[in-house]
Image: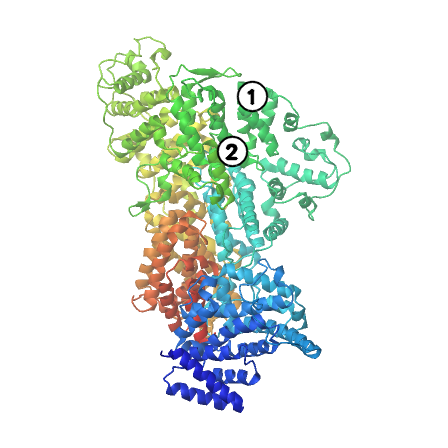
Amino acid sequence: MAVPVEASLSDSVVELTKVAQQKGSDPLVWAIHLSSNLTSMGVSLPSVEVANALVSHICWDNNVPIIWKFLEKALALKIVPPMLVLALLSTRVIPSRCTQPVAYRLYMELLKRHIFTLKSEMNGPNFQTVMKSVDGVLHLSSLFGQPASEPGVFVVEFIFSMVWQLLDASLDDEGLLNLTLEQNSKWATKPQDMEIDGNDYYDEKWTEHNEILKNANTVMAIEIIGEILQNKVTSRIMFLARRHMQTHWASFIRRLRLLGANSSALRNSKTLSPESLLQLISDTRIVLSQESKTSSLQKFHAVMAFGSLAPSASRSALWLPLDLVLEDAMDGYQVEATSLIERITGLIKTLQAINATTWHDTFLGLWISALRLIQRERVPIDGPVPHLDTRLCMLLCITTLVVADLIEEESAPLDGTEWGSTNHWKEKEVPVKRRNDLVSSLQMLGDYQGLLAPPPSVVSVANQAAAKAMLFISGIGTGNAYFDCLSVEDMPINCSGNMLHLIVEACIARNLLDTSAYFWPGYVNGCVNQIPQGMSAQVSSWSSFLKGATLTPLMTNAMVSSPASSLAELEKVFEIALKGSDDERISAATILCGASLIRGWNVQEHTAQFIIRLLSPLVPAELFEVDSHLIGCAPMLNALIVGIASVDCVQIFSLLGLVPQLACSLMPICEVFGSCVPNTSWTVTTGEEISAHAVFSNAFILLLKLWRFNHPPLEHGVGDVPTVGSQLTPEYLLAMRNSLLVSSGNTFKDRNKMRLSALASSLSPQPVFVDSFPKLKAWYRQHQACIASTLSGLVHGTPVHQIVDGLLNMMFRKIRNRGSQSLTSATSASSSSSGPGSEDNSLRPILPAWDILEAAPFVVDAALTACAHGTLSPRELATGLKDLADFLPASLAGIVSYFSAEVTRGIWKPAFMNGTDWPSPAANLSNVEQQIKKILAATGVDVPSLAAGRTSPATLPLPLAAFVSLTITYKIDKASERFLNLAGPTLEILSAGCPWPCMPIVASLWTQKAKRWSDFLIFSASRTVFLHNRDAVVQLLKRCFTATLGLNATPVSSNGGVGNLLGHGLVSHFCGGMSTAAPGILYLRVYRSVRDIGFLTEEIVAILMHSVREIASCGLPKERLERLNKTKNGLNYGQLSLAAAMTRVKLAASLGATLVYLTGGLVLVQSLIKETLPSWFISNHRSENEGGSEGMVAMLEGYALAYFTVLCGAFAWGVDSSAAASKRRPKVLGTHMEFLASALNGKISLGCDGAVWRAYVSGFVSLMVGCTPNWVLEVDAGVLKRLSNGLKQWNEVELALALLGVGAMGAAAELIVENEM
C-alpha cells in the first residue's frame, strides 16, 4: 500500500527534527537543512504540511526548548506560514496554559513577533491554501458568519480571533469568565476532560514557580491585547471588525470592559493601565482615518470645521432648513397627508448628522427655530390663512412630540446600531443622555429673551405658567384647581411669564421633564408665603367638572373657552360624548372642539384623536334598523364637524398626521347623510334645527379641504412626472390610512407611526376603499370628468335633467315669473316645482344631496351659457348661484369644480368689469398696483403695469368673473367662513393662472368687499407676478441667496441669515401700507403654483456656484486669496477669513438644498442627482476666478456642491433607513456613484474645472463616510472598489480606505495591510 505524500512529508520532517534534537544541532543549521530537503522534494514554501507536523510534534510529547527554537527558525526562514502556526498553537496551547505555562509564554512571544507581519504573508505564495487551513483550524467562517475565502475578510477574522482568544483566556485565569453574559467562551480555554496533563507530578517548588509564571502570562496576554489595539495596522483591522461584525463586537467589548474593570493582572501591568485599555476601545481612539501626510479627508474636515468657528449667532444658520420647513408648513392651502412630526424628526436627525452637532445644540436649534416661527407672526394679518394658533401648536405640541420621540428612540433604539455624525459606531448611549441635553438646552434657551417674549394673546397664559411654578417652589399645594383662575394681579410679586414657561409645561405634560425644572436658576422671580387672596375662593370650570359638576350651558361655555390641563379631564369629556344624553353629547363635542383643540397644547394630540374617534362611532351591537347608526348621532357629529372647520383646526390635524384618518371618518358621514332627503332634521337645545343637508354639506366641504380638490387640472411637475403633492386624492388618503394597518403593532419603529396605527386600528381594523362609498365615488368620477373635458351627457327627460330644470327654476324664479323661457332645452319643469307666485320653499326640490350634486355642474353650465348669451344678467347669475349654494352649501363644490375646469379652457368671451354689468375694480386698482410694487421692491422683479385697466374697463374670463361675483356675495363672518375657505383658495389659484392682471383685478374687487383682508389679498396678488415669468422666479431665488448670505451688506458678519430670508411673516406693516416682503416668504408662497419646476435645479446650482464666488470675493480679498493659494494646503493663512467664508458656503449650500427639496420633494432631488449634476460636470463650467483653477475658490465650489448634494439626498431619503423614501435611495445613489467611479477611471470625459471636480468627489465621499455611512452600505461593492481605486490614483489613500471601511470590509483590510496604514 502506497504511503500518502502528506504522511511521508510529515514523517520526514519529524524524523529530521528528532535527529537534530538528539545531536543538539543549531536551529539555524536545522532550518537550512530542512529547507534544502523540502526544496529538493518539490515542496512549495511556506508549507502547510510542515507547520502541522512541527506543531503536532511539540504538543505535547516534545515540549522542550530546542523544538520551540526550531519552530522559531522555521518561521523566520518562511518554511512555515506564521498565521497557520499561530492558529494551530492557539488551539492547543491556550487550553493547556495552566499545565504548560512555559509553552503559553513561548506562544505569546511568537504571537508578538508575527501577528504584525501581515503584508508579507498576504503577498506570499500559497496564501489561499494557508487561508483554507487556518479556517479549518479556527472555524472562522462558521463562527463569524462570513466566508473566510476573501483575503481581507480572512485577515479581519484572524486578528479578531487571536485577540478574543487571549481575552477569554485572561478572563478565565482571573475567574471572570463566569461573569460574562454567555458564561463561557467560543474558544477552547480549558483542557478537554479526556486530555492528560503533561506532567505526572509537581513538587512544591515547581508549583510555586508555575503560579508565578501563570500570573506573569496573564499580564503578558493582556499587554499583547493592548499592543494589537495600539498598532496602526491591527487597530484599524479591529475597527473593521467593530464596524462589520456588530453582534460579535458587542460581546467582545463587554468582556474587555469586564476585564478592564476587574482584572488584578491589568493593575499589575507596568505598560498598560485599566484606563488606557478602555481608552483604546473608546470611540475617540478607534477610528479608521488617522494622521496622514496627504489626505483630502483630513483637509475636507478641516475646511468644513472652519464653518463652525463662526460666532454663536451665525451657528443658528445651521438650522436654516428647519426654519424653512416650519414656515412652509404654515401655508394654509397645503394640507399634508403625512405627519409633520415624522418629517421634522427625520430632518433633525439629518441636520444633527450632517452638522456634527451634539444633541444639546440640536435641541437648542429646534427650539430657536420654532420660537422664530412664533415671532414672525406676533401680529398676524387677517385672512383665510393659519394664524398664531397653528404656530403655537407647532412650538408647544409638534416640537415637543418630536423631542419626545427622539428621547424615546434613545431609551428604546431601533434595531441595529445607530450612526453618529463623527463617531460612527457608538455604543448604546446612557439612556438619559438626550434627556439631559434637553434640560441643558432649555436652560440655555433662557438667554434668548427676545425670542421668548410671548405674543399679546398668550401673555396671560404664560403668566399663569410662571405663577404656577412660583407657587410650587413656595410649597403652596394648590393643585391645578386654581391655576386657570390665576392672574398676575393676584400675585404679591412680579411673576410675568414667557414662552419658556409654556415650553416647560408642555414638556412636563409629556414626561420629558419633572417639576424640578421650576427650581432652575432664574426660572421664577421669587417665592410667596401664602395663597393669594384673589384666587383662594376660585376654582376652575374644569376642576369643578372633574368633581362632578354637570355640563350646564354656563359650564360648557367656560370649558369651551379654556383648555383642559390634563388627559384625565379630556377622557371624562370623551366618556360623556360617548354615553351621555343627546344634549350632553353635543356639549361634550363642543368642548373638545374649543380651546382644548386650539390652545390645549399640553393635550392637543389627545384632543384631536378623541374628536376623530367620535366622528367614527362604533356600530351598536343591538342595531336592527335599516338606517345607519350615524343618523342618531347627527347633532353631535355636526357639532364636531362645524367645530373643526376653521383653517387653524384643519392645519392642526394636518400637522399631527391625522388627515387620512379624518378623511376616512368623514366619508361614511357624507355617504349616509348625502343619501337622506332634506326633511330629515334634528332640533338641539338652542332651538337650532339641523337638516341632513346641513350635516352633509358641513362634512363634505370639510372633506374637500383635505385633498387638492380646488387645484386646476394642470399640476406642476418634473417633466411628465407630477409631484407627490398632486397625488393627494381620496384614494391616496385612504391608502395612507390603510398603510397604518398593513404592518400594525411592533412593526413600526417610531412612536408617531405607532400612535397613528393604534388610532386607525381601534376605529376599523380592516382597510377602507373608495368603493365602500358608491355615492362619493360616483361624484368624484364626475368631478374628474368635468375637469378633463367639456360638460356633456345631460339627456332630455332623464331624472338628472328634471333635477337640473327644477334647480334652475328655483334659482331664477323671478325670470320664470316674467315668463322667460327655461334656461335648459327642457319644455317642462321639475315635478317638484310649482306655478308662479308659489313660496320659495315650494320651489326647492326635496332630493338627497348626492342627486343635487350630480346635477350642479349642468345647472352652472346652463346659467353661465345663458349669461353669455344675454338671457341672464351678471347680477342675476350671481344671485342665482348664491341661492343654489344657500339651498345646499355642498353644491359650492360643484360650482367650484365647474369654474375650475372652464377657466382653464379659455373658450369663454371676456367679461368687462365696468361697474354696470359686472363689478368694477377701478376704485382701488391703482392702490393695489402700488402695494404690489412695494412688496416686491427688494426682489428686483418688474411688476407689469396695470395702466391699461385705467383707460378701458378691466376684463376677466367669463367663468372667473362669475366666480368672483359669487364669492363677494358672501358675508365675512364665522357662518360663511368654512364655505369661503373652500371657494377662496380656488378663486386665488384660478386668478393666478389667468393672464395678468386677472389676480390684481380680483384682489381689488375683494378688498372693496373685505377691507380687513386687504393685506392678505394684495400679498396674494403679488405672488402672481412670478407665475407668469420664469425669469422672475429665478430673480427671486437669487434674492433669497443674497439676503441669506448678506452679500450686499457690509460688514458681512452682522448681516444675512434667517432673519433676512424670512423677515417677519407675510408682510411688515408700517404707517400707510406694507413694506417689502421677505424673499423667503415670497418663494414659499409661490413655488407650489409654478407648474414646470424642472428648470429650477439647474438654476439653483448656477446660483449656488455664483454665490460661492461672491463669498470668496467678499470674505477673501484678492491679495489674501493669492497668498492662500501659495500656502501648502490653503489653510495656514487667513484662517479667520476662511472660517467666515466656509460658514457662508455651507449656509448657501444648505439654502439651495432646502429649496430643491421643498420645491419638488423626492422627485426633484432624484432628478438633480441623476440628471442635473452629471450634465453640469460634463458640460464646460471652467472657473474664471482670479485665483486660478486650482485655487481656494475652486475648492470651495467643489465642497459647496458636495455639501449641497448630500443635504438634498439626506432631506429626501434620510440618513438612515427609517423613512419610506429610503427604499428609493440605493438605485439613485448607485447611479451617481457609478458616474463618479466611471469619471475617475477615465470612462467619462468631464468639462468642469478639475479642481472643482476633485473637491466635489472628495467632499461627497467624505460626507457619506462621516455622516451617512448607511448610504455606503447600499452601494455595490464593485463600484466602491472602482471609486477607491480612482481615489488612490489621486494619492487619496486615506479617503479610499474610509470609503471601503464602511462598505467593503475585505477590500478595506487589504488596503490597510498593503499600505501598512
The disc labelled 1 sits on which kind of residue? Gly
Asked if 536 appears above or below 293 in the picture, the reply is above
Q: Is residue 798 left or right of residue 929?
A: left
Q: Is residue 155 left or right of residue 1027?
A: right
The disc labelled 2 sits on which kind of residue? Ala
Measuring 34% from the left and 53% from the top, which residue is drawn there?
Answer: 1167
Residue 1123, x across and y down, in percent: 47, 73
Nearest to N terminus: mark 1 or mark 2: 1
Indicate the quadrant where residue 588 lies. top right
Residue 608: give its label. Answer: 2
Q: Secondary structure at mark 2?
A: helix
Q: Secondary structure at mark 1?
A: loop
Measuring 69% from the left and 31% from the top, which residue is drawn there?
Answer: 482
Asked if 719 appears above or below 855 in the picture, the reply is below
Q: Is residue 530 left or right of residue 802?
A: right
**Residue occupied by mark 1:** 580
